[in-house]
Amino acid sequence: MTKCCRDVAERLVMITSENKAATGEAPSRPDAPARGSWFKLARHPATVRRALLTACIVGPVLIAINAGPAILAGRLTRTQVVQMGLTFLVPYLVSTVSSVATRREVNAGASAREASSRTGRS
């Protein structure tokens, strides 16, 4: 399962880079935090990769907890299958929100240090 998720994450990063190249946008670098809107930060390749990895680890655990008995008994309903799909979405969103918040904090700190160095204050 982890290798599958890693492959999906790598493909999404590649697609994101191709889209940026097609639109003339500079490619993202993990060592250069993105600046801008929430959605731009959420689409950052490192954010997507981390969120997918988290979803691929936490999602199956939650599914096992919530639908394990029905899976083992072979009595899954259509509703449970939809819920299982949505179960992957929760850790993905939690990881994305956390990563975007962290990137914003890092960007704010970098901006403050940059402004401080321009004014000669430390």
Image: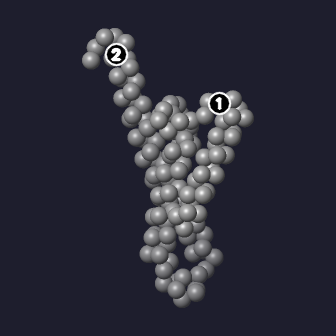
How many numbered discs sit on the rendered protein? 2
Q: Type of residue at label 2?
A: Ser
Q: Position of residue 57 (x, y in %)?
A: 47, 64
In the picture shown, does residue 44 fall above or below 8? above
Q: Splitting the image into 4 quarters, where does residue 78 fall? A: bottom right
Q: CA distance from mark 2 to mark 1?
A: 28 Å
Horizontal and vertical percent for residue 50? Answer: 48, 51
Q: Residue furthest left?
A: 122
Q: Nearer the viewer, residue 31 or 56?
A: 31
| Residue 86, horizontal then vertical, whole percent | 56, 64
- Residue receiving disc 1: 25
Q: Position of residue 70 (x, y in %)?
A: 53, 83
Q: Quadrant of the N terminus?
A: bottom right
Q: Residue at x 33, y 17 (%)?
A: 116
Could you tell me if residue 69 is visible in this image? Answer: yes
Which dot marks residue 116? Answer: none
Q: Are marks 2 and 1 in contact (CB under 8 Å)?
A: no
Residue 40, quarter of the rendered image: top right
Choose between 80 and 117: the one closer to the eye.
Answer: 117
Mark 1 surroundings: few (<14), some (14-19) or many (≥20) residues within 10 A: few
Three-letter code, disc 1:
Glu
Assign the C terminus to one quadrant of the image.
top left
